[in-house]
């Protein structure tokens, strides 16, 4: 029986803050190695090495639900929930024109030249989300097109064998980039 399981990623400044309080079982990759982020918090058969006996794809087919707990260093700079809400304000998008600033940013730092090839600036979270999707292999053919053209097809499925971003992931990552921009501004005194 196949289950259509959601892909749930949870970002942490330090994931051990959760895993030291709640016991989970590490997920296993198809090659037998430990999955970097996957954890099961439900009953699943456990091997002698402490990992799930089943690889994560087979486990999903059987209905086991895996959470991906991601360490995101940007969150180490967030003091509390109120501070995070403040950091979610609209950033100074013009700073993306500065290569030294751009290259510090999570998820996009290595793609300054690609951003420069876009005919219009990244000036919003939705545009940053599209940019994050455009730099994935399945959507690279959209580089250099105006945002209105990119928007027509960027969220269409590229097929299972192609690496692309879902809109939900892209928007979440884009918001994180915006938060990171504001953290960098805050660290440098505005």
Image (cartoon, rainbow, N blue to C red):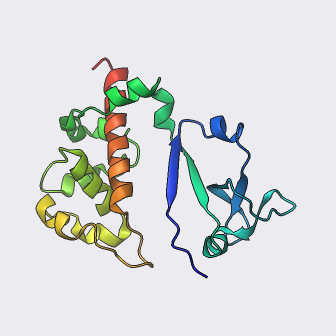
Indicate left or right for 108 with 10 as reference: left
Residue 116 visible to the viewer? yes
In the rendered view of the protein, which quadrant contains the C terminus? Answer: top left
Indicate left or right for 159 with 65 as reference: left
Residue 135 visible to the viewer? no
Frontmost residue, 30 versus 81: 81
* Residue at screen point 33% across, 74% down: 157
Vertical arrangement, residue 157 with respect to residue 121, above or below: below
Frontmost residue, 67 versus 35: 67
* Residue at screen point 35% across, 30% down: 85
Q: Position of residue 30 (x, y in %)?
A: 67, 72
Q: Residue furthest bottom?
A: 1
Q: Position of residue 145 (x, y in %)?
A: 15, 64
Write down the quadrant of residue 104 in the picture: top left
* Residue at screen point 22% across, 64% down: 143
Write down the quadrant of residue 187 in the picture: top left
């Amino acid at each position: 029986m196949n289950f259509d399981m959601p892909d749930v990623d949870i970002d942490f400044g330090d994931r051990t803050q959760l895993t030291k309080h709640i016991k989970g079982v590490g997920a296993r990759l198809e090659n037998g190695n430990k999955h970097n982020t996957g954890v099961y918090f439900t009953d699943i058969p456990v091997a002698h090495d402490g990992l799930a006996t089943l690889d994560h794809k087979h486990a999903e087919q059987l209905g086991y639900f895996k959470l991906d707990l991601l360490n995101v260093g940007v969150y180490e700079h967030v003091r509390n929930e109120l501070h995070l809400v403040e950091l979610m304000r609209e950033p100074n998008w013009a700073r993306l024109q500065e290569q030294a600033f751009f290259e510090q940013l999570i998820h996009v730092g290595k793609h300054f030249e690609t951003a420069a090839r876009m005919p219009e600036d990244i000036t919003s979270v939705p545009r940053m989300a599209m940019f994050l999707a455009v730099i994935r292999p399945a959507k690279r053919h959209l580089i250099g097109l105006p945002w209105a053209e990119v928007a027509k097809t960027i969220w269409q499925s590229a097929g299972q064998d192609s690496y692309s971003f879902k809109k939900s992931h892209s928007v979440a990552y884009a918001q994180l980039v915006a938060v990171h921009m504001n953290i960098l501004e805050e660290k440098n005194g505005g």
